[in-house]
Amino acid sequence: MASFSMSSITALMLFLLTVFFYIGLFPVSSFEFQVGGTQTQGWVVPPANDSKIYNDWASETRFRVGDTVRFKYEKDSVMEVNETDYKRCNSSHPNFFSNTGNTVFRLDYPGPFYFISGVSGHCKKGQRLIVKVMSAESEQTAPSEGDKSSGSRVAVNFLTWSTSLCIILSLLCFALSYMVLSF
């Protein structure tokens, strides 16, 4: 039977405490959004009377750096293009192209992302989307009156603060366990 010294048991406890900090206090850092939400059949040409369905959905959604958008479609494609090509429905110079039927695109910087269908005529019928990714600064600004998602900003600020505290405490626990193991 193995015997353990008090210092090895203490080090193990400190290590486990560090792991629990990571598991319990770190918020989810990113989310995946199904394009169109639950109101659509996926990435399809919208009905003629609802050609702004994708942009209406995106304007009600708060995207952050690191989030992903999932496009589900059949016999179609998705392209990420610049603003000019978005406005003109020009699919000849995409920054990104996929026709897999289940495309996940990572939003890796703040600002707008412009998406269009690569199938001829679909973009002009409304199968296009602008996703506006918030910067860290815009998350920390005071919400305006009537901003229906202001509660999210408060939660983000709290989670940012708690994440920083968690990192500091974890580093302290790690340093302490290293010191205990050294003796």
Image (tube, grey):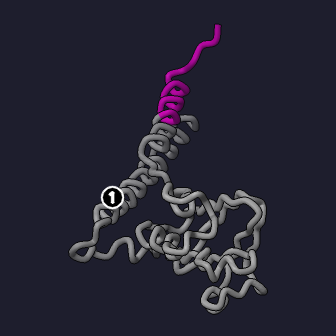
Residue 156, percent from left and from top:
37, 61
* Residue drawn where x is 56% and y is 63% of the image: 35
Task: Name which residue lies at 55% across and 69% down.
Answer: 47
Main SS category, magenta section: helix
- Whether residue 10 is in magenta: the answer is yes
Q: Quadrant of residue 77?
A: bottom right
Residue 97 sits in quarter: bottom right
Q: Secondary structure at mark 1?
A: helix
Q: Residue at x 52, y 56 (%)?
A: 31
**Which percent across, then down, holds residue 48?**
55, 74
Question: Dot 1 corresponds to which residue?
Answer: 155
- Please state the total of marks drawn on the protein image: 1
For the residue pair 157 and 30, the one nearer the viewer reads as 30
Q: Residues within 10 Å of mark 1 (few under 14, many from 20)?
A: few
Residue range highlighted in magenta:
1-16
Quadrant holding the C terminus: top right
Q: Is residue 138 left or right of residue 117?
A: left
| Horizontal side, residue 34 vs residue 91: left or right | left
Q: Is residue 37 above or below residue 135?
A: above
Point 21% across, 75% down: residue: 145
Amino acid on which the number 1 mark rests in the picture:
Ala
Is residue 44 on the magenta stretch? no
* Front-lying residue, 4 or 42: 42
- Image position of 6 with respect to 155: above or below: above
Instruction: Name the spot of residue 11 as percent of width and height, x first.
Output: 52, 32
Q: Quadrant of the N terminus?
A: top right
Q: Is residue 78 left or right of residue 141?
A: right
**Residue 95, percent from left and from top:** 73, 80
